[in-house]
Image: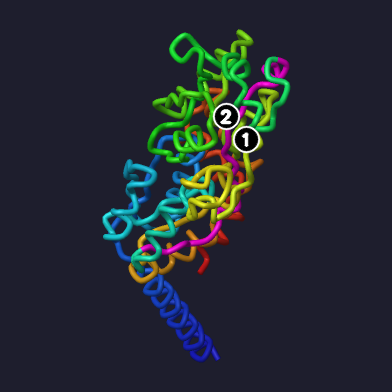
Amino acid sequence: MLLRNSTLVAAIGAFALATAVSLGAARAQDSSDPIKLTLHDWTGQLITTHIMGEVLKKAGNNVDYVQADYLAQFAGLETGDLDVAMEMWETTGREAMDAGIATGKVENFGPTGMKAKEEWWYPLYMKEKCPGLPNWEALKDPACAEAFSTAETAPKGRYLGGAVTWGGFDEERVELLGLPFEVIHAGTDAALFAELESAYQRQAPIMLWIYAPHWSQVKYKGEWVEFPEYTKECYEDPSWGVNPDMAYDCGKPFGEIWKVGWVGVKDKWPHAYEAIKAFHVDNDEMGQMIAKVDLEGQAIDAVVAEWMGANEARWSEWIKK
């Protein structure tokens, strides 16, 4: 009996070892080469990307973070010099994403779970100086435009856009809708919101690019300008819309924030690929994390580490496959 039990124990041990080796081999299908995740110039994207990177590290993958231009990054994604971009916004990046996917070298890895909104925004205290708002046609009134002017743009209104790399067609929109505004670009995400903070404290005029998910709509009371509603034809067919000669005479699109990457990711890192597709956070969750960084001064690494600790059961599911 003892011999038979010993034989059984040995057999079970051998089976367990074989199973472990088999599972290890399955996990080893992922290349040991680092997965290159792109970093851009706004807080939320840095958080999203570092969360994904930390999850992939937990799965045994190697990760590199690479600074890249939001739109120009598609050249690297097409060649495989870059692997994954965790935030491509429907509002500003759809054209670049579609063009990349059309090459057959870029893949849409699915939605992040966050919904994008980006548009011209003003504090509510400015509404009494331009009472026709939020209708965009109120901005055509020279008196309204002048209410939003600064010394550098007067008598034209000043619109503070995001970094040039974000795209958005704001210069085209101003021209095509006949708005007496001048577009001035903030150099960085931090500079954009520093100007908002300063203007809000002084009750000074400001019209600027605001996006969601973000903490700004919670901290500051204001409204988005209501432009002619976006349609695909507005961006592709010049005859569509207010201006019959050129495209982009409408507001920005709303919609998903996508994950995209090099089409070879699924073959080179099949397990990481499944984890990237499974990644999901929502606007409220991301807005709270952005606030911790931008308002409370916490480090991105600390915020990401806190999220990882609080959501282990969740991200563990992402890397199970």
Mark 2 crowdedness (10 Å alpha carbons): few <14, some 14-19, many ≥20:
some
Check the image and tell me how it is coloured. Answer: rainbow
Identify the residue shown where x is 59% and y is 11%.
204
Q: Give the overall secondary structure of the magenta segment.
A: strand
Identify the residue shown where x is 46% and y is 35%.
42
Work out whether 222 lies above or below 10: above
Work out whether 282 lies above or below 209: below
**Left of 63 or right of it: where is 259?**
right
For the magenta stretch, what is the residue range?
Answer: 106-128
Question: Which residue is tagged 2?
Answer: 292
* Marks 2 & 1, CB-CB < 8 Å contact: yes
Question: Which residue is tagged 1?
Answer: 288
Work out whether 75 lies above or below 125: below
Secondary structure beneath label 2: helix
Residue 113 drawn at (x, y percent): 60, 53
Q: Looking at the picture, tell me which residue is in the foreground, 9 or 268.
A: 268
